[in-house]
Amino acid sequence: MKSILLIGLGRFGKHIAMKLRELNHQVMAVDHKEELVQEILPYVTNAQIGDSTNEEFLRSLGVDNYDVCIVGIGNDFQSSLETTSLLKELGAKMVVSRAATDVQEKFLLRNGADEVVYPEKQMAKWAAIRYSANHVLDYIEIDNDHAIFEVEIPAFWMCKTVGQLDVRKKYSINILAVKCGSKLDSFITPDTLLCEGKSLMVMGKYKDIQKCFRI
């Protein structure tokens, strides 16, 4: 369980708060709008109304005591940038800030953000990859070159074992798990049999996965 300071309680911040609650983390939520703070109360450990660009207010929160500080301000980039910078100056261990453009991402990284979340760009990339190929079910980007894909098992792989296919040697990708409905089997051996009704979780370089599954 981690202690998290969440600043900015619009739609993005609210969704983060709700998910963090599911994961049983302790969350201090902050926004300058009273109505947003009231709405978030059922999902967080504590909440305060305040101006995150005010150094004394931020200092009073003890930002250096949180494992992660998330700046989810989306409609006021100046406030987001000032908040990010102040958090780092006050000793925040980890600052994650939201960006809406490439320029904002660069400025945030230069002014205190350890990492930047770019929801629109990341979602657009996910949707483009997910829906442009019939057999891609999901994917998670690891870095600019690597990803984990959930893919349908190709027809010519059916009723063959992982050892027979030898995809690691042929395509330089790793089969991490076999998924059947909501059940995930990560105990993969050369004798694991691939059959209809299942999907694969595979990891590797984009170019190798694209070549292997003809994405």
Image: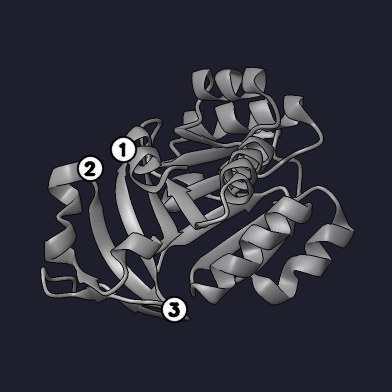
CA neighbours of label 3 inside 10 A, class few (<14), some (14 to 19), many (20+):
few
Question: Which circle's residue, 1 or 3, is located before the other in the chain?
Answer: 3
Cα–Cα gap, marks 1 and 3: 24 Å
Q: Is residue 172 visible?
A: no
**Which residue is rendered at x = 44% and y = 45% of the image?**
64
Cα–Cα gap, marks 1 and 2: 6 Å
Q: Are marks 1 and 2 in contact (CB under 8 Å)?
A: yes
Picture coordinates of residue 95, whole percent (x, y): 49, 39
Q: Is residue 206 visible?
A: yes
Q: What residue type is disc 1 on?
A: Asp
Residue 156, quarter of picture: bottom left
Q: Quadrant of the N terminus?
A: bottom left
Specify whether 65 is left or right of 15. Answer: left
Tag 3 secondary structure: loop
Q: Which residue is mark 3?
A: 197
Picture coordinates of residue 56, whole percent (x, y): 64, 37
Numbered tag placed on residue 9 in the rendering: none
Q: Which residue is mark 2?
A: 171
Numbered tag placed on residue 208 in the rendering: 1
